[in-house]
Image: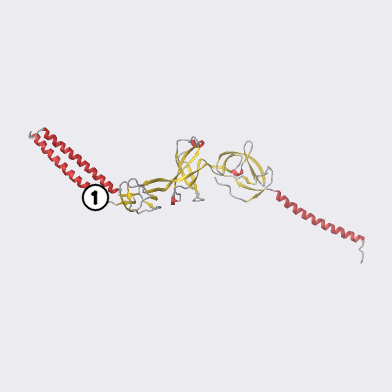
Amino acid sequence: MKKCAPALCIAVLLLLSGVSSCGNGQGGSVAAEEQALTRVPEVMVVEISRRPVYKTYTAVGGVSPREVSRIGPKVSGRIKDIPVDEGDFVEKGGLLMLIDPFDYERALEHARSQLDQARASLERAERDLARMEGLYRATAVTEQNLQDAVTARDLARFQYNQAITAREVAKRNLRECRLEAPFSGMVTAVAANEGELAGPQMQAFVMMDMSTVKVEVDLPEEIYSSLRTGNPGEITVDAVPGQPFEGTITKIYPTIDPVSRTFTVTITLENPGLKLRSGMTARSRVIQTVRNDVLAVPGDALIRGEDSYIVYRVREGIVERCPVTLGIGGDDLFEVTSGLSEGDRVVVRGLAGLESGTRVRIAHGEDPPES
């Protein structure tokens, strides 16, 4: 085997060493760049804009109907017909129950005949009194005879009035054989059956008017003076997820509970489609104050400092620490009165470890929360 010349071997070794060195330099540069990128924190930002901010209070209550009635007959008798069932909607004046009217029809006929008899007796007594007055003027009868005729006329008139009253009672009792709905609403309970004997003590039906419902909730006493009837309120129920119902405060109770230090308000709302039912658990959000068209910052962007709140604003990829002054606070948004301008972008995710001057990468995320 031939040996290579020393000079040639040295040249080959130097060439191989140079190639290896160049390769290691490029790989190290790429790796360093990738490592540098991974050290730049990623944050999520939202843009400051003008919008309404609501200061609200939440509480839990129960849905109840605008009107509820427990209905029973006013007369006694055997139930002849019940044309409704639980869950039926009945218009005002619609028939709920019919009591056999036979006895009451006979009673009305008797009262009418008694009235006719009393009317005839009164007419005869008036004629007798007129004749007696003529005889008295002719001195044909004594004054006692005249007074007796007057008394007979008054008694006949009294009996006639009694007969009129008896006829009206009989007519009313006959009408009461028809138990009718006092308002338009839903029958929620039926506690009677056809063929049973009914009486004034029976509560045969429960009806509810659910076209409008109300929710009563307890709120802390510190907001008592700031609420007014007519303030808006929002209701959500578990049975209808994702759908809020708008209502209005219609009543503010005048007393504060000395134990819980709360007061009660009534929120009334329309119920189209009868989606809300009596007894549902309702979560209410009562709006105490509204600021329209103000700069609003999400609560997720705020950090409590020693003297004020701060946010981290991002400009051209660089973080700036900005103290801000706040107005009213809502559920998710807070009014900003100083420290930010419309269009500024503030960090809402990735706040940990941020400092002024830090370069960041902006991630695409959710829109800023609504109040």
Residue 31 image position (x, y, % from top left): 75, 53
Q: 106 and 112: which one is in front?
A: 106
Residue 215 image position (x, y, % from top left): 46, 44
Q: Residues within 10 Å of mark 1 (few under 14, many from 20)?
A: few
Q: What scheme was used to colour the molecule? A: secondary structure
Residue 296 image position (x, y, % from top left): 57, 43
Against 63, is 8 above or below? below
Q: 352 and 202: which one is in front?
A: 202
Against 339, is 82 above or below? below
User: What residue does disc 1 label?
Assistant: 106
Residue 187 visible within the image? no
Position of the C terminus, as image quadrant, is top right
Residue 169 image position (x, y, % from top left): 26, 45
The residue drawn where x is 19% and y is 40% is 157
Please tell me whether mark 1 sits on a helix, a strand or a loop.
helix
Identity, as a three-letter code, of the amino acid under mark 1: Arg
Residue most toward the bottom? 1
The residue drawn where x is 76% and y is 53% is 29
Left or right of residue 358, residue 250 in this image:
left
Position of the N terminus, as image quadrant, is bottom right
Residue 24 visible within the image? yes
**Count of marks overlaid on the render:** 1
